[in-house]
Amino acid sequence: MKPVIIAFFAHGHENIQATHETTFEVTKETTLTKRGDCIIAVEATKGAADLPLEFKEAARKKGAQITITIEAGELREIVRTKGSPRLLFTHPTDLVVRKTDYVCGRTLAIRADKAASDLS
């Protein structure tokens, strides 16, 4: 199967803590409280609903593997995850990557090998 590559941009925020142990999130929202401990970036150019159909279809295939590359300045993180036929991709602002199998409209990928607290 041919790889599907998508790219989007987001920004940091003074309230980012990135301490959550099972998820990380990128959001299109511009504000962030300290309660959002899974959020690693704001002002994203995409939410789950904005992802291309080609990506959604590929991610929903049984056994789909998703590799996420996060770059910020000189830092680079690779997160290995899985797709699922249960992925919905309906949320207008959020993208959540989970270590668990939980799926909702915000979920980008499951069974991730890293969460917010694991990132550099």
Image: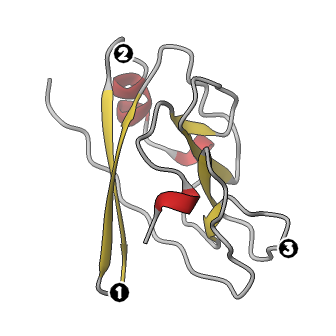
Taking the image as shown, residue 36 lies to the left or right of residue 61, namely: right
Dot 3 alpha-carbon crowd within 10 angstroms: few under 14, some 14 to 19, many 20 or more: few
- Asked if marks 2 and 3 touch (Cβ < 8 Å), the reply is no
> Which element carries disc 3, helix, strand or loop?
loop
Quadrant assignment for the C terminus: bottom left
In the rendered view, tell whether residue 106 sits above or below residue 118.
above
User: In the image, is 51 to the left or to the right of 70?
Assistant: right
Instruction: List x then y, in percent, for residue 74.
Output: 29, 86
**Which quadrant holds residue 98?**
top right
- Could you tell me which residue is drawn at 67 percent across and 56 percent down? 20
Q: Name the one closer to the observer, 14 or 27.
A: 14
Looking at the image, residue 56 sits to the left or right of residue 69; the answer is right
Of badges 2 and 1, nearer the viewer stands 1
Q: Which residue appears at 32% of the width and 15% of the height?
A: 63
Quadrant of the image occupied by residue 45: bottom right
Q: Residues within 10 Å of mark 2 (few under 14, many from 20)?
A: some
Which image quarter holds the N terminus?
Answer: top left
- 62 to the left or right of 110: left
Q: Mark 3 points at which residue?
A: 33
Q: Distance between the residues labelled 2 and 3?
A: 35 Å
Dot 1 crowding, Cα within 10 Å, few <14, some 14–19, many 20+: few
Label 2 is placed on what type of residue? Lys
The answer to which of 60 and 100 lies nearer the viewer is 100
Find disc 1 in the rendering and name its residue.
73
With respect to residue 61, does 53 lie above or below? below
Q: Find residue 61 and name its label.
A: 2
Between the residue at mark 2 and the residue at mark 1, the CA separation in whole angstroms equals 33 Å
